[in-house]
Amino acid sequence: MEPIRRKRPQNFVNFLAFLALAAFLGLVMASSTLAKQTSEPKRLTNAKGGDCVACHGQAQVMPEGHDDTKDMTYEDCLACHDGKETASLRTNIPLGHIHHLQGVSCQDCHGDSGEYNALETDECFACHDSGEGVAKLTEGHGEENPHNSPHYATDLDCELCHHVHEKSENYCAQCHDWALVVP
C-alpha cells in the first residue's frame, strides 16, 4: 500500500498570501477611485470662469501635451482656443468648458447636497428657456433644426445629445446625414 501524501503547507501559505495581496490591492484601487469621485466636484467650487490656469496649471488636470502652457493666461489660451470651446471635459473635471466659462458652478445645477446626479430636461430649462425657446434660438443653424424635429417637435430630452461630463453626440446622425455640431 502506498503512503498517503499530504499537500505541502507551503502551497496553502502561498495561496493565503496571494489572496491577502489581491484583497489589499482591490481595497487600494477602490478607495482611490472613491476618493477621486467624491473630491472632483469640489475642484471648481472657487474657480473663476475664464481662468484656465487655475485648473490647467496643476499637473493632475493638465491636458496631455500641454505641459508648456501651465503658466499661460486665459488670453494666451485664446491664441489656439476660440473661447467658445464646446467639447466637454472628461474624467478629471466634471464640468464642460462652455458652462465653466459662463461662471456656472456645479452647485448652480446640482444644488448643495453634494450629490451630482444627472439632471432632467426641466432642470436645464431653468437657464435654457423651454423647448420652444431653444428651438427658436437654433433656427437657421443648419439643414434641420434638431430642437424642432419632425419626430419630436419641441418635446426635448437634452441629455439625449448634450452630455456635460463626456463628449456630446449627434443623435440625429444615427439615421440622417447631417453634420450638426453638438456642444
Image (tube, grey):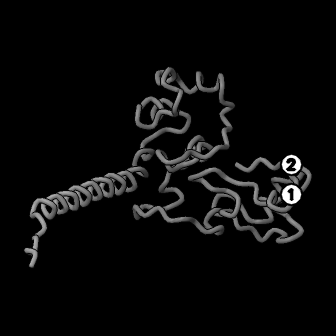
Residue depicted at x 81% and y 50%:
180
Tell which residue pokes out farthest to the bottom in this image. 1
Where residue 93 is drawn, which disc sits there? none
Q: Percent position (x, y) of residue 10? A: 11, 59
Q: Which of 58 and 148 is in front in this view?
A: 58
Residue hosting label 2: 141
Residue depicted at x 51% and y 22%:
69
Residue depicted at x 13% and y 67%:
7
Rendered image quadrant of residue 76: top right
Circle 2 Cα neighbour tier, 10 Å, few/some/many (<14 / 14–19 / ≥20): few
Circle 1 Cα neighbour tier, 10 Å, few/some/many (<14 / 14–19 / ≥20): some
- Circle 2 sits in a helix, a strand or a loop, which is it? loop
Q: In this view, does 15 lie to the left or right of 47?
A: left
- As shown in the figure, which amino acid type bears the numbered disc 1? Asn
Q: Is residue 76 left or right of residue 84?
A: left
Residue depicted at x 86% and y 57%:
145
Residue hosting label 1: 145
- Disc 2 to disc 1, how far (Cα)? 7 Å
Q: Nearer the viewer, residue 7 or 127?
A: 7
- As shown in the figure, which amino acid type bears the numbered disc 2? His
Confirm or deny contact between disc 2 and disc 1 (CB under 8 A).
yes
